Amino acid sequence: MRFLLTLLCFTLDLLSCLYVRAHTRPLSQQSSRWPVPYRQVDERPDVDSYCEALYPFCPNGDRDGRIPYMRDTDSISVYRLQAPVWEFKYGDLMGKFHIMHDAIGFSSAETESNYTMEWYELFQLGNCTFPHLRANASAPFWCNQGAACFFEGVDDVHWSRNGTLEKIGVITGDMFNDMAQWVQEDNQTGIYYETWTVRSDPGPNATVWFESFDCSQFVHRTYRKLADLGAKLSSSSPTKYTKVYLYSGEPTYLGNDSTIFGQLSMKDLAADIQKFYYTFRPHQSYVDFAISLVDIYEKVVVHKNFYLYYNSEYWHLPMKPPYMQIVYEEVPLP
């Protein structure tokens, strides 16, 4: 029952956003290092026109992702920003379940201009977590890119009403410009949103199989970059962030689109993956959604199966109790 309640809370957000037989690698090709490293790309590819956002990505930001240049002598205040996901639509509902979105604010002493920087999905969370099943395509179709968004202004009410708006440090204009250069380079190479953190169990000595790559991870990486540049960051309260955990035994590598969906010998596995993701399809009626919740429970809890898509490859997760948790955990500032 706890799993279903957790899944229902998480799926409320996903549905609002959404418009085994194991084929293993030879032993020499199995991942010898956990967690599986997040794969960077050489440059951001074009987005398929099939992918459409319910709400436009970064509507107030620069179209080409440019960040203003600051004078080296400027003094820039840095702010930790956090608010419930989809706060503008649901208010504090997601906050009650600790499903939070993170960002960073900046304020220039010389220009008195304020800025917000965040990293999130181009096509909302649901599309990054589960694929579309298109009638004319054998493989699931993913709209899972994420990107940084930088725009002028900080919505004080949005961040402070149900979340956090806290000054955590001051940097020079020179530090800001170096950080901006790093953000623009990072934005072209770390492009795929990964919702799940997969671990062997909830304990402190658990093995992490896969790390998420989401808004909070971008914030952590930016804080570390600022610290590397010499910034001193501190908070008067615990710095907590949302993590969505799956728990499983050691994952099994299955393959990519061409090796699974392009070979007749893999048709049973391909069909099983399609069937698994069908239960998470968008735009379901209330009745279909209720049926899907039962199907998900049967697949994940009863049969202990989950198919994870990571680095554009599929993995099988042999699920373990408690299967899934949304955890609001502390990650100290660097």
Image (spheres, rainbow, N blue to C red):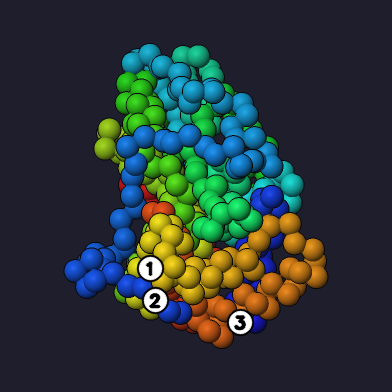
Compare residues 49 and 101 and report the one nearer the observer. Answer: 49
Say if mark 1 contacts mark 3, CB within 8 Å.
Answer: no
Q: Distance of mark 1 from mark 3, alpha carbons?
A: 22 Å
The mark that comes first in sequence, 1 or 2, is 2
Residue highlighted by disc 2: 22
The mark that comes first in sequence, 3 or 2, is 2
The mark that comes first in sequence, 1 or 3, is 1
Residue 190 in picture, x, y percent from top left: 39, 42
Question: Which residue ends up furthest to the front in the rendered image?
Answer: 264
SS label for mark 2: loop
Classify the position of the N terminus by image quarter. Answer: bottom right
Residue 43 is drawn in which quadrant?
top left
Which residue is located at x 48 percent, y 34 percent? 46
Label disc, if present, on residue 54 of the rendered structure = none
Amino acid on which the number 2 mark rests in the picture: Ala
Say if mark 1 contacts mark 2, CB within 8 Å.
Answer: yes
Compare residues 188 and 247 and report the one nearer the observer. Answer: 188
Which residue is located at x 59 percent, y 37 percent? 49
SS label for mark 1: strand
Seen in the picture, residue 162 relative to 265 is either above or below; the reply is above
Residue highlighted by disc 1: 254
Seen in the picture, residue 194 relative to 202 is either above or below; the reply is above
Residue 174 in picture, x, y percent from top left: 32, 21
Total numbered badges shown on the rendered structure:
3
Residue 21 in picture, x, y percent from top left: 43, 79
SS label for mark 3: helix
Which residue is located at x 46 percent, y 62 percent? 261
Amino acid on which the number 3 mark rests in the picture: Glu
Residue highlighted by disc 3: 298
Residue count near mark 2 (Cα–Cα under 10 Å), binned few <14, some 14–19, many ≥20: some
Compare residues 192 and 334 and report the one nearer the observer. Answer: 192
